[in-house]
Image: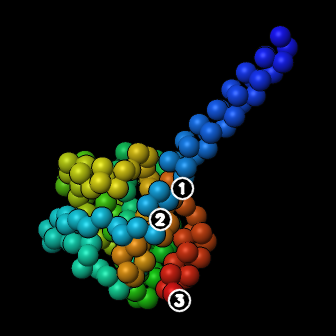
Amino acid sequence: MKTVGYILLLIAAILGAVILYSVYQNLFAPESSGNMAPDFELEALNGTKIKLSNLRGYVVILDFWATWCKPCRQEMPILGKIYDTYSSKGVVILSINIQESKGTVAAFAQAYKINWTILLDVNGNIASKYKIKYIPTLIIIDKNGCIKHKHIGVTQYNVLASEIDSLLKG
């Protein structure tokens, strides 16, 4: 009888490990890494239309965020430093605000002195297309339009810089 109990315990442990691994992969692994980034067109805060596929030849960072998100606010200075360092080297940052009004986003951009492109995903359609579950989420796309990295939560400057440097060389 003890043997049956041990077997059931072993099966439960294996099943638990498989479930945890699956959850981990969905949260932290770049599920679409190597795949083409889904194309989209959104209005920028300044009123211009930006289409992702028009940015081939650049390394593109998609930053999904909201003004009410404390980690998103913490990440803005890091993105500012990335912008200052890499914008002249072929890197484009598109901060995609999810489901907030243009006025709210404009006030935030002014307060945080954001000088890179902010896009308005008013209905959350692009966030859904990219399967964004948590913010901030950064997706890094190579010059050919392929997703190379995905980060959930605040990402440190040195991590981003290393990945960007690698993509700029390749």
Instruction: Tell me the SS state at disc 3.
Output: helix
Looking at the image, residue 27 sits to the left or right of residue 10; the answer is left
Neighbourhood count class around disc 3 (C-alpha, 10 Å): few under 14, some 14–19, many 20 upward: few
Residue ID at (30%, 64%): 38
* CB within 8 Å, label 2 to label 1: yes
**Mark 2 falls on what kind of element?**
loop
In the drawing, does residue 116 fall left or right of residue 150?
Answer: left
Identity of the residue drawn at 81% across and 21% down = 6
Distance between the Cα atoms at labels 2 and 1? 8 Å
Q: Is residue 54 visible?
A: yes
Position of 10 with respect to 28 (left or right) is right
Mark found first going from the N terminus, 3 or 1? 1
Work out whether mark 2 precedes mark 3 in sequence or the reverse, and give the earlier one.
2
User: Marks 2/3: CA distance?
Assistant: 18 Å
Amino acid type at circle 1 is: Ala
Q: CA distance from mark 3 to mark 1?
A: 23 Å
Q: Is residue 20 above or below residue 161?
A: above
Amino acid type, label 3 = Lys
Q: Position of residue 10 (x, y in %)?
A: 75, 28
The mark closer to the camera, 3 or 1, is: 1
What SS does tag 1 mark? Answer: loop
At 50% across and 53% down in the image, what residue appears?
152
Pick the front one: 122 or 11: 11
Residue 29, numbered circle: 1
Residue 110 lies, in percent from the top left, at 30, 63
Q: Disc 3, disc 1: CB below 8 Å? A: no
The image quadrant of residue 163 is bottom right
Residue type at mark 2: give it: Ser
Residue tagged 3: 169
Q: Position of residue 153 (x, y in %)?
A: 51, 52
Of residue 58 and residue 63, the one placed in the foreground of this image is 58
Residue for badge 2 = 33
